[in-house]
Amino acid sequence: MSNEKDTNDPTADDPDEPPHGGVDDSSPAGNGEDATRGDPEPDDGPANDSGADEDPAAGSDGESAAGPDDESAADPDDGSAADPDDGSAADPDDGSAADPDDGSAADPDDEDDPWDDGVVVDDGDGFDETDVVGEGTDGARNGNNPEPSDDGGIDELGSTVEVEGAEIDEDPDEDDLLGGLKIDTTAELEIPDRLVDQVIGQEHARDVIIKAAKQRRHVMMIGSPGTGKSMLAKAMSELLPKEELQDVLVYHNPDDGNKPKVRTVPAGKGDQIVEAHREEARKRNQMRSLLMWIIIAVVLGYALIIVGQILVGIIAAGVVYLVFRYLNRGSDAMIPNLLVNNGDTKTAPFRDATGAHAGALLGDVRHDPFQSGGMETPSHDRVEAGAIHKANKGVLFIDEINTLDIRSQQHLMTAIQEGEFSITGQSERSSGAMVQTEPVPTDFVMIAAGNLDAMENMHPALRSRIKGYGYEVYMEDTIEDTPEMRRKYVRFIAQEVAKDGRLPEFSAEAVEEIILEAKRRSGRKGHLTLKMRNLGGMVRVAGDIARGEDAEMTTRDHVLQAKGRSRSIEQQLADDYIERRKDYELQVSDGYVVGRVNGLAVMGEDSGIMLPVMAEVTPTQSGGQVIATGQLKEMAEESVQNVSAIIKKFSDENISEKDIHIQFIQTGQQGVDGDSASITVATAVISALENVGVDQSLAMTGSLSVRGDVLPVGGVTHKIEAAAKAGCDRVIIPAANEQDVMIEDEYEEMIEVIPVSHISEVLDIALEGETEKDSLVSRLKSITGSTLKDGNVSGPSNPSPQ
């Protein structure tokens, strides 16, 4: 078979196929647009001694790269008008019948292809270009896009996939933490092959990703870290419809070296084109080297034998050598730069551009310190693709989207809107800033992700483009606790063991303990946490402990040890604070003290700490005021003002003549945020005003309305455990939070949990003395307009994150 280009390729007549040469006319940077603009064909080298040298596919003797025995550059049976004896591989300048610019009777499609570089692609195993260009209309190219599997369509993917590999009880008991799974270890479960099948929870987000993959829509996912944003982004690259992947080549522009030309070809062909160019350059260099040494020998012989001036001969030989070296350099410089190589890519590309600087995201042109004198590097050879170009026909994932600078966000939305983006040097001080390529395809699906604060610093126009051409999704932190979800959590543990590859399998008891921890970390009764990364961390710690003991499987004891060893930094600090306060007697957990109340706070997401609050009433010097100290933030300051409304209405004394000082003890540099200390502040101030002691074996947390209703707060489980660690016997929490209490077994016997609905209940429990206390409580009830007997105090059923 001839290795030369078939100018009458039958696949060129297929309207679904790209035009001859493998260049897709619909491509933003393809040859169709270039033909419209009348862009010249990229030059294959400087002026040479013969037309054969100008052709990158032609040998030094004018024969084609396929060898002198090739009869034709086209199939002799296809009726082509190409001269079978012209010895050309489709040299665009030699006037052959395959020349697209000479008006010959060759295939009319060739007239639209100024990119016919004449390079014969031969991989050494009888490769024919029709194998690349004409594989049918299904978009499969060179085996890069396998046929869809028979294991289910896209609608059957994701969290709807049931747990397989184990027997399931159809009517499991409510207390069955395995959700009816009858297993002894996680080894009995089958792990899904596809990433989207491994997603746990996030039903809404999964459905959006499937729809977006079908229609190639952009998606922005906002939520807490570790809820599965990056996993869904990777899964989307597997779900994208099968499309023709492309390689991108950058050529030298003979008209303007600072404006390199761009060509797109089917995936896998780019490597072959570059190798063909390199082979042709090597052959030309060999012939020139041979010619050079022949000329040098003749010059030296003439100078020595005929003229008798050896010095003149040496100088002439040196000039000849330099001339040939320069010509060789120019030949090498004409080799195209393979900018994007998808030859080995089997599915849609996935590029994670999180934290990428402008050059890595948008592409760049390297600086050239040698910009003249024949030592410079050609501009097209210094072009580097960015993530937006490498993600063409695939997925571009950017987490913490708000950390991108405004300029990068503006360029990003241009690439999204136009589907193409030129590459230029990102540094103004670099020689690369003078270079700007033709537009390079950027037909990607973008998945932007971030926390809730990501939307604040995000460019409004970029968000508008994502929303206008796609979806916005909020990632849930928790999910309802059902038998089905429990089974999926068991599968999640099996997945983590399989991914790590070094952990022992988990026993059923160990799995139950981890699911209990998932319930506890959710902070809501009847829910499981969806912060799977943190939960997976505990799985790995437990497995490491088991492996360190050479255990055959990970047991419940290993998981319990992992809970202690995988404590967060905040929890470790909180435990350290508690110990230090005990050493210096800063923590009081017995007796009665006027104006001092043990408050509770949350550090981070999974740790609690006890923070005392003290109040003092003093004569005023310039009008009564409430003064709060302890690094209070905005919400905490507002809660103090709300409490002062109750105090002013409650007190019989004229507090305009008094200053009320409130101090949050040892809050540190992090300060106090939120209003969960409202009932603590109110109790301390009332105690100071009435000079009534507060029980120091009691701790409390809860928000407070201006009418005295106790409102729910967040983190009650961690706060209760912190109170138990500090030595308190009782703890007051909002009644609405009673359903959210899921403390560890070891603390249940250490502390009594008391739910309350009104500030009068808090005072009734916390203050010392029956007579004085009864008077205060009854007076407060009548003032606030709420009584316990009426039962008209209501609050939200679910805690707010305070």
Image (spheres, rainbow, N blue to C red):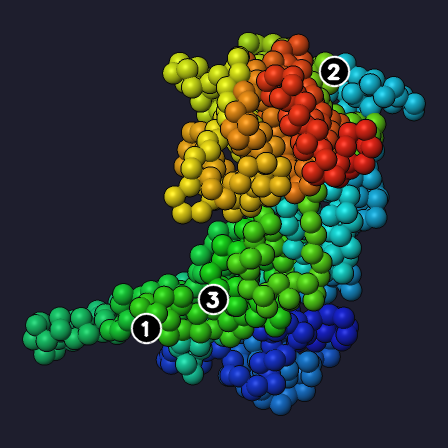
In percent of width and height, residue 752 lies at: 67, 15
Asked whether the residues under the numbered discs 3 and 1 touch, taking CB atoms below 8 Å apart as contact, a structural biologist would say no
Q: Residues within 10 Å of mark 2 (few under 14, many from 20)?
A: many
Residue at image position (68%, 80%) is 109
Q: CA distance from mark 3 to mark 2?
A: 53 Å
Quarter containing the C terminus = top right
In percent of width and height, residue 710 lies at: 68, 34
Identify the secondary structure beneath mark 1: helix
30 sits left or right of 308 in the view: right
Q: Residues within 10 Å of mark 3 (few under 14, many from 20)?
A: few
Q: Which mark is residue 327?
A: 1
In percent of width and height, residue 157 lies at: 80, 43
Disc 2 designates what residue?
Answer: 508
Q: Amino acid at mark 1?
A: Leu
Q: Amino acid at mark 3?
A: Arg
Identify the secondary structure beneath mark 3: helix
Q: CA distance from mark 2 to mark 1?
A: 74 Å
Residue at image position (48%, 16%) is 588
Q: Is label 2 or label 1 in front?
A: 2
Disc 3 designates what residue?
Answer: 407
From where the camera sits, is residue 602 visible?
no
